[in-house]
Image (tube, grey):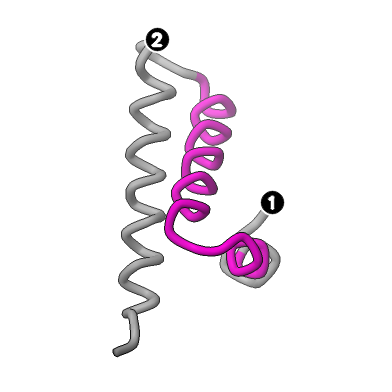
Amino acid sequence: MKPKFLVILNQAINEGVLRGYKKASEHNENPNKEYLCETIEECVLGSLYEHFELELVQKLWASDGFTK
């Protein structure tokens, strides 16, 4: 049995985006763009770390498709 890598990756990213948006908007009705993006990025990385091993997340982050 093989996991559906892209499905899991997409789910982890979506969870992180939603969590980050909610977190950024929780205490500030209109968060600025920079704070919103930073919070979403932080939560997406956290979600990736929950679903994948550290080395894989670092490889994904360094490869095309992700920017620092």
In this picture, is 66 found above or below 1? Answer: above
Q: Quadrant of residue 30?
A: top left
Label 2 and label 1: CA atoms lie apart by: 26 Å
- The secondary structure making up most of the magenta span is helix
For marks 2 and 1 on the same chain, the one whose residue lies earlier in the sequence: 2
Residue at 44% x, 48% y: name it.
47
Callout 1: 10 Å neighbours few (<14), some, many (20+)?
few
Q: Which residue is mark 1?
A: 68
Quarter of the picture containing the N terminus is bottom left
Q: Describe residue 3's horizontal placement relative to residue 66 as left or right.
A: left
Q: Residue furthest bottom?
A: 1
Kind of residue at badge 2: His
Residue drawn 35% across the image and 16% down it? 26
Look at the image and say whether residue 2 sits in the magenta stretch: no
How would you rate the neighbour count of disc 2 (Cα within 10 Å): few for under 14, some for 14-19, many for 20 or more?
few
Q: Residue at x 32, y 79 (%)?
A: 4
Residue 13 to residue 25: above or below: below
Residue at 56% x, 25% y: name it.
Answer: 35
Label disc, if present, on residue 27 of the rendered structure:
2
Check disc 1 and give the amino acid type. Answer: Lys
Taking the magenta stretch, the answer to whether it contains residue 54 is yes
Direction from residue 11 to residue 50 in the image, left or right: right
- Residue 33 rendering spot, x and y as whole percentages: 52, 28
Across and down, in percent, residue 61 comes to 64, 61
Using the image as rendered, state which of residue 17 and residue 52 is in the foreground. 52
Please provide percent x and percent y for residue 8: 34, 67
Image height check: is 65 above or below 48? below
Is 47 displayed left or right of 38 in the figure? left
Residue extent of the magenta highlight: 32-60
The label number, if any, that marks residue 46 in the structure image: none
**Element at label 1:** loop
